[in-house]
Amino acid sequence: MAETSSAGVGQAPLSGTDRTRLRRISEEGRTDRAELHAVLAAGFVCHLGVVLDGAPMVVPTVYGATADTLYFHGSVASRSLVAAPDATVCVTVTHVDGLVLARSVFEHSVNYRCAMVYGVPRLVTDPEEKLEGLRVLTEQTAPGQWDYARRPNRKELAATSLLALDLTEASVKISEDPPEDGEGPDAALGIWAGQLPLHQHWGTPVPDPVLPAGIPVPAHIAGRTF
């Protein structure tokens, strides 16, 4: 089973490989592995880039992260692993935090947090690790749901494709700055410039139309910020 402690790989600085080296706006790069964990912990949807039948494909899927492993659903990646078991994939997680509205369109940009993880994933076949990986994925998506809902049975586990990707090779970029043209010629234009933050929140829970009366929203769902 994958190690979930914060020791070892989880504490090592982010790798500086040719794939993770930032070639543009390198000052937005982060080398502290804690920044990687923070970006991964803030979401639950990633985009998985694979080569399938000789053509690139990028698919969204849910994920869950431990200190050193990224677990994600991957039926498409599973097919690519069969065809090319040593093929590298790229998993990307991006959070848009706002717009940067400058005085000129050229200087407009987006504030964001982004992590990219490279590596050769492995198909999780051990029943114990698969169950743990699905727990990690479920709890990252909806904390508390694993202990509330029915857990997968043996047939459902066999029908589920779960992949594990080591977090050794990764890069992180974070953009959080105001417009950059405040001290240039465009500052004299008298045009408003600044940042337009973007915030996401959960709405009010909507029950299943066929849910029997009297079943309340569980505390771990009702307690989330709406």
Image (cartoon, grey):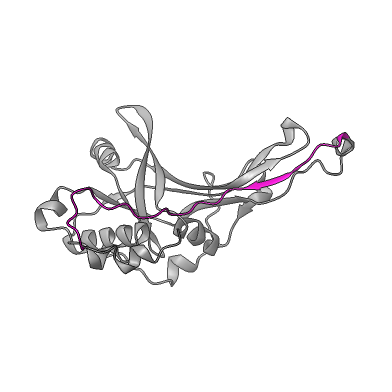
Name the quadrant of the C terminus: bottom left
Q: Quadrant of residue 81?
A: top left
Residue 176: x, y in percent? 66, 51
Query: Foreground residue, 116 or 112?
Result: 112
Query: Foreground residue, 139 or 169?
Result: 139
Residue 115: x, y in percent? 50, 50
Residue 129: x, y in percent? 23, 62
Residue at horizontal 33 percent and vertical 27 percent from the top: 54
129 is within the stretch colored magenta: no
Residue at horizontal 30 percent and vertical 58 percent from the top: 138
Compared to 101, does 214 lie above or below?
below
Can residue 37 be seen by looking at this rendering?
A: yes
196 is within the stretch colored magenta: yes
Query: Foreground residue, 17 or 166?
Result: 166
Residue at horizontal 43 percent and vertical 71 percent from the top: 6
Q: Which residues are magenta?
A: 189-214
Name the quadrant of the N terminus: bottom left
For this orientation, the residue located farthest to the left is 155
For this orientation, the residue located farthest to the top is 54
Q: Quadrant of residue 85?
A: top left
Q: How many labels sit on residues?
A: 0
For the stretch drawn in magenta, the main secondary structure is loop
Judge from the rendering whether residue 66 lies leftward or rightward of residue 196; answer left or right. left
Judge from the rendering whether residue 183 lies leftward or rightward of residue 93; answer left or right. right
Compared to 74, does 3 lie above or below?
below
Query: Foreground residue, 181 or 122?
Result: 181
